[in-house]
Image (cartoon, grey):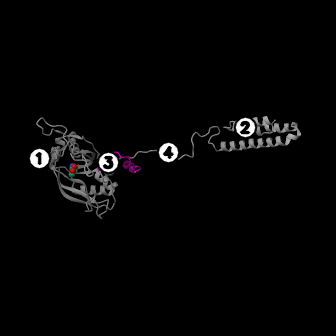
Amino acid sequence: MLDRVKEIYQEIEHFQIQSKDELEQFRLRYIGRKGVVTDLFEKLKQVPQEDRRAVGQELNSLKDFAQQRFKESSTSLENSFSEDVQPPVDLSLPVIPNLYGAQHPLNLVRQQIISIFGRIGFSVADGPEIETDWYNFGALNFPDNHPARDMQDTFFVDKKSNGAPADLLLRTHTSNVQIRLMEHQKFNTTFQPIRAIMPGRVYRNEAISARAHCMFHQVEGLYVDKNVGFKDLKDTLYHFVKEMFAKDVKIRFRPSYFPFTEPSAEIDISCQICHGSGCPICKYSGWVEIAGSGMVDPNVLINCGVDPEEYTGYAFGMGVERITQLRYGVNDLRLYTENDVRFLRQFQGA
Ligand code: DAH
């Protein structure tokens, strides 16, 4: 009898209970009124009187053991998700976060610029980064001896046999796209007003440091139509800086010189880093330059086949790195190209 009890202990211990069916089978076999344990209790009468007490105790603990196993299995089945399948993962483990990327800050700001100007009717135009001397300099009224044409400042793609700069160069600004847009007018039967911004990369022969880079980004703007005046330029740029920065941003137009605009102005805004209290970004002046601008020089219009007696225009060109610096406080230009994820991750969700 005791051997049989031992056998059943083992059976109970090893019985697989992974579904409600198996649990029911277990119940019928070890707990139910027709089960093996009840059967053993029946047989207790046949055990000799002197052993009956000890065997009875053994049977009672066998019964407890079976009930205990039943209880445990039924609660663990109830806690599992589906009737038959144990969850394949440990649900108490911490979640592995999804690793979302972030937009590059320069891309982010470029998109913001495009959408601000888009809302006031500016389309987006593009032009080549490898450009001829004419589009980058000549048509923009640069004199032959202008220092920007020097190899110290500009990357030329190759040299002529006499060592002089060849015609092809990496554009030094996005103003080349102005020329390409305006000369397109020749394909139109009547003049179509131009109102576009032109984002893109530009290149200059500079040593890389925290404040200078040989490759950076600009957004050019051009508006040519009848009766475009300097007031339109001021209105548009004032609107832009209020949208881009704080509503209380201050703007000032400082007289300046560019070969392709007359009159010309540089545009400063109140420093968005120190708000006037003085910091290295604004060199303690409270003002930061963000763009060059002016009325398109009549010579430039003529170079593009646009009649300056009938049409006028304004143009501007702004540095995307500078605007990003003021927007997000990025103080070292090299961060933009180093691909350090600790830097880039800060723009997640921006
Ligand atoms: N091209 C100039 C630069 O790279 C910026 C600029 C100034 C663009 C005046 C313009 C402008 O369109 O009107 O420094």
Q: CA distance from mark 1 to mark 4?
A: 62 Å
The picture places residue 156, in percent across and down from the top left corner, at 18, 40
Q: Determine if the C-beta at disc 1 is less than 8 A from ligand 1.
A: no
- What residue is disc 2 on? 12
Distance CA(mark 4)–CA(mark 2): 39 Å
Q: CA distance from mark 3 to mark 1?
A: 33 Å
Position of residue 264 relative to residue 64, above or below, is below
Mark 2: few/some/many CA within 10 Å (<14, 14-19, 20+): some
What's the amino acid at mark 1?
Answer: Asn
Helix, strand or loop at mark 3: helix
Q: Secondary structure at mark 4?
A: loop
The label nearer to you, 1 versus 4, is 4
Q: Which mark is on residue 336?
A: 3
Q: Is residue 163 left or right of residue 217?
A: left
* Residue 2 visible from this viewpoint: yes
Note whether ligand 1 is within 8 Å of mark 2.
no
Per the image, the residue denoted by label 4 is 96
Q: Earlier in the sequence, mark 1 or mark 4?
A: 4
Give the crowd class for mark 4: few <14, some 14-19, many >=20 residues within 10 Å.
few
Give how far across and how far down residue 123 sits, in percent.
30, 46
The N terminus, quarter of image: top right
Question: In terms of secondary structure, where does tag 2 sit?
Answer: helix
Residues packed near mark 3 inside 10 Å, few (<14), some (14 to 19) or many (20 plus):
some
Residue position for label 1? 145
Kind of residue indicated by mark 3: Tyr
What type is the residue that disc 2 sits on? Ile
Measure the C-alpha gap from mark 1 to mark 2.
Answer: 100 Å
Q: Which residues are magenta?
A: 333-349
